[in-house]
Image (cartoon, helix red, strand yellow):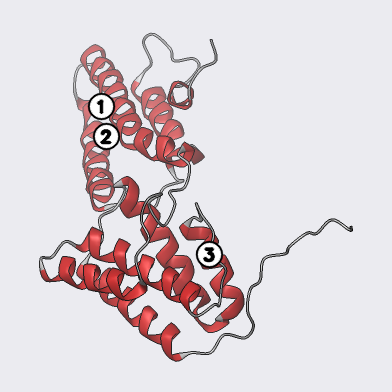
C-alpha cells in the first residue's frame, strides 16, 4: 500500500531516547520541511506559531531539570507538535487534490441581473460566502450576455478569469484573486468577508464600464465536405 502525504510528514528515524539537543534538532528539522510551508498562514496557524515559540522557550529551560525527565518531556513535546501540525496541514493537502468547482450549477440558467440581486440579498443578511459566489456568477453571465465570451458548460472560476484577463488586462490581478476566493469559499477553506464582497462588486462595476480589447471566441473545427 502506498503511503499517503501525511505519513511522509513523520521523520523516518527517530532515536528511542534522544537527548535534549537531538530532540530539539529533530523537531526543528521536521517543521522546516517545505510541506509545512505551502499554505498561506491563517489566524489559527499564526496562533499556533506563537505557541511553538513559547514551547521552544519552555523546552530550552528543561536543561535545569533531571536529565532523564528532560529527555522524556522533549520527546513527548516533539510528538505532540508533529501530530498537531499534521492535523493542520492535512485539510490543505486534501483541498489541493479536489477538482475545481464549476461556476454554475448544472441545472441553473439565470441572468446576470438575477445573480446580482441574489448577491445583494445575501449581502444584506451578511451571508458573504453566498454573496461573493453569486456576484462572481453575475460577472461570468454578464460577459456571456455581452457576447464577450462564449457560453460553456462546466466552466471553472479559473477558466473564466483566464478568458477575461485576455480582454481586460488592467483587471488581471483582481480576476486572479476572485477566482481563488471563489474556490476557497466553495470548499470552505477560507470564508468570504464584507471586504471581499465589496471588492467583487467594484470589479463587476469596472468590467461593465470597460470595453474588452477583443472577443475571446472559441475555435471551431470543421470537417471539409
Say above or below: 193 vs 209. above
| Mark 3 or 2, closer to the camera | 3
* Spot occupied by residue 206 in the image (x, y as percentages of width and height): 41, 86
| Mark 3 or 1, closer to the camera | 3
Do labels 1 and 2 touch, CB within 8 Å? yes
Alpha carbon separation for disc pair 3 and 1: 67 Å
Q: Which residue is mark 1?
A: 63
Q: Looking at this view, is 34 or 90 the one in front?
A: 90
Quarter the C terminus occupies: bottom right
Quarter-wise, where is residue 78 in the image? top left
Categorize mark 2 by other alpha carbons within 10 Å: few (<14), some (14-19), many (20+). Answer: some
Residue at 42% across, 57% down:
103
Alpha carbon separation for disc pair 1 and 2: 7 Å
Q: Looking at this view, is 52 or 102 the one in front?
A: 102
Residue at 21% across, 42% down:
51
Label 1 residue SS = helix
Categorize mark 3 by other alpha carbons within 10 Å: few (<14), some (14-19), many (20+). Answer: some
Residue at 24% across, 59% down:
130
| Mark 1 or 2, closer to the camera | 2
| Any part of residue 43 in sight | yes
Q: Is residue 129 left or right of residue 8?
A: left
* Spot occupied by residue 62 in the image (x, y as percentages of width and height): 22, 27
* Spot occupied by residue 169 in the image (x, y as percentages of width and height): 57, 81
Alpha carbon separation for disc pair 3 and 2: 62 Å
Q: Is residue 180 left or right of residue 83?
A: right
* Spot occupied by residue 217 in the image (x, y as percentages of width and height): 66, 71
Q: Which residue is mark 2?
A: 60
Q: Which residue is mark 3?
A: 151
- Disc on res. 136: none
Say above or below: 165 vs 188. below
Amino acid at each position: 500500500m502506498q503511503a499517503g502525504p501525511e505519513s511522509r510528514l513523520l521523520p523516518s528515524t527517530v532515536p528511542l531516547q534522544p537527548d535534549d539537543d537531538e530532540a530539539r534538532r529533530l523537531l526543528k528539522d521536521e517543521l522546516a520541511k517545505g510541506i509545512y510551508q505551502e499554505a498561506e498562514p491563517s489566524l489559527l496557524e499564526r496562533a499556533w506559531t506563537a505557541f511553538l515559540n513559547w514551547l521552544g522557550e519552555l523546552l530550552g529551560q528543561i536543561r535545569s531539570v533531571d536529565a532523564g525527565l528532560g529527555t522524556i518531556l522533549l520527546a513527548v513535546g516533539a510528538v505532540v507538535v508533529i501530530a498537531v501540525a499534521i492535523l493542520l496541514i492535512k485539510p490543505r493537502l486534501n483541498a489541493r487534490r479536489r477538482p475545481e468547482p464549476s461556476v454554475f450549477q448544472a441545472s441553473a440558467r439565470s441572468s446576470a441581473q438575477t445573480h446580482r440581486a441574489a448577491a445583494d440579498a445575501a449581502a444584506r443578511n451578511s451571508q458573504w460566502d453566498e454573496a461573493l459566489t453569486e456576484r462572481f456568477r453575475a460577472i461570468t453571465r454578464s460577459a456571456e450576455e455581452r457576447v464577450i465570451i462564449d457560453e460553456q458548460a462546466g466552466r471553472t472560476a479559473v477558466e473564466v478569469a483566464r478568458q477575461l484577463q485576455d480582454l481586460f488586462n488592467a483587471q488581471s490581478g483582481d480576476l486572479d484573486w476572485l477566482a481563488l476566493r471563489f474556490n476557497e469559499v466553495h470548499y470552505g477553506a477560507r470564508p468570504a468577508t464584507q471586504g471581499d464582497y465589496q471588492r467583487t462588486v467594484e470589479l463587476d462595476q469596472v468590467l461593465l464600464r470597460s470595453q474588452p480589447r477583443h472577443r475571446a471566441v472559441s475555435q471551431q473545427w470543421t470537417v471539409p465536405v
